[in-house]
Amino acid sequence: MSWRKNLFAVTAATFIGFTGFTLVMPFLPLYFQQLGVTDIGEIALWSGLSLGVTPAITALMAPLWGRLADRVGRKIMIERSLASFVIVMAAMGFVTEAWHVFALRAVQGLFAGYGALALTMAADAAPRDRMAFAIGTVQTAQRIGPALGPVIGGTVAQIVGLRRAFLVTAGFYLVALVLVFTMYHERRTHVPIDAKREGRITFRNVLALENFVLLIAVVFGLQFVDRSFGPVLPLYVAELGTSMDRVPILSGVLFSISAGAGAIGNHLARGLLSRTSARAVIAGSAAIAALGTLTYVFAAGTAVLMVGTSVFGLAIGAASTAAYTAAGAVIPSEARGAGFGLLTTGSLIGLATSPIICGLLGTLSLRAVFVLDTFALLFVAGLVRRLMAITPTTPTAAPATEEV
């Protein structure tokens, strides 16, 4: 069976899943209002807790689910995760209290992690010389899905109401589950591991792999900066003199530019990695991304933000794909689930901490957030340039077959 069919199944399921998730999550505060919460402070509290609990629990669980996937197979584990989302999202359409939403989101965190498993499956499915292409393709789906989800979700909620929108989301996950079940063909590389072999493959072994801890730090740093825009960008657009009636649409355009440019950057990384080392791609891309955030620091109007956002998105996308590809190249195939799970933990910690830290910093100065982003990216570039060993991300032997 062609590896491309496997990649299509994983990419399509990822796109559908990430789109489905963002159909409803941006409108969670409105849902709490429908559940009878009237105080604005309480709505904000329940929304923050409910949105934060899932990535927090997923960050703890991702390496464990990944390690289990190394033993029993990736396909069944991603099916488990998608099936849990079908059930939880459908259940959210029938809740009657705010704490019910929080509880279901906590349960969701326990069984989530299909994003990391999708990257693992993409790396497994592709020949090694196509690994960057496979990882970049899945990451593109992970970016474009959330960019389209809120627009689709707003339309769905308008037509069927917020409660039924959760059922529509459950339907999205069901389609993703069927795609993986019917189209993905898993190679039998995940055979039971004998006791001696199992004793050698531990989280400590994975962390000891060349460059791996550094790459976790890189993934954390890139995610931290990428997510820092959320709490402050609309406020910054307004601060630059944009009329309040135009702030939402202009902010939305900038978020879309960032997502679209990031998706292009994910694919650009493939060509860059075929010509130079992952170290050069990550360090160079992080430095270029810093130029993008620097335009925010000195912006006098919103026009320059579009240029800066395009530069930032392209560079952050290329750096992210290069980091995951470099990690995939050093992780043994029988430990990729655990490895990508650890990388996902680093990413989720960045996702969870960035809005908090940057939101607090933004209360002092909005420009200070982008100053922090610039220094963080330059620090990542310098750290990679100084500490990362050059490891091939493509094979030097004969090219692999395109059949699995």
Image: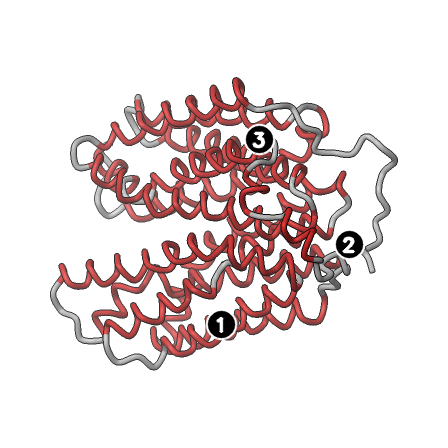
Q: Amino acid at mark 3?
A: Asn
Image depth: mark 2 or mark 3 in front: 3
Image depth: mark 2 or mark 1 in front: 1
Identify the disc placed on residue 84: 1
Label 2–label 3 contact, CB within 8 A: no
Other-residue count near label 2 (Cα within 10 Å), few / some / many at <14 / 14–19 / ≥20: many
Q: Position of residue 303 (x, y in %)?
A: 36, 30
Q: Earlier in the sequence, mark 2 or mark 3?
A: 2
Q: Amino acid at mark 1?
A: Ser
Q: Residue at x 26, y 61 (%)?
A: 47
Other-residue count near label 3 (Cα within 10 Å), few / some / many at <14 / 14–19 / ≥20: many
Q: Residue at x 46, y 27 (%)?
A: 289
Pointer 2: what residue?
Answer: 3
Front-most of residues 189 and 159: 189
Identify the disc placed on residue 211: 3
Q: Could you say whether the residue bearing mark 2 is in a helix, strand or loop?
A: helix
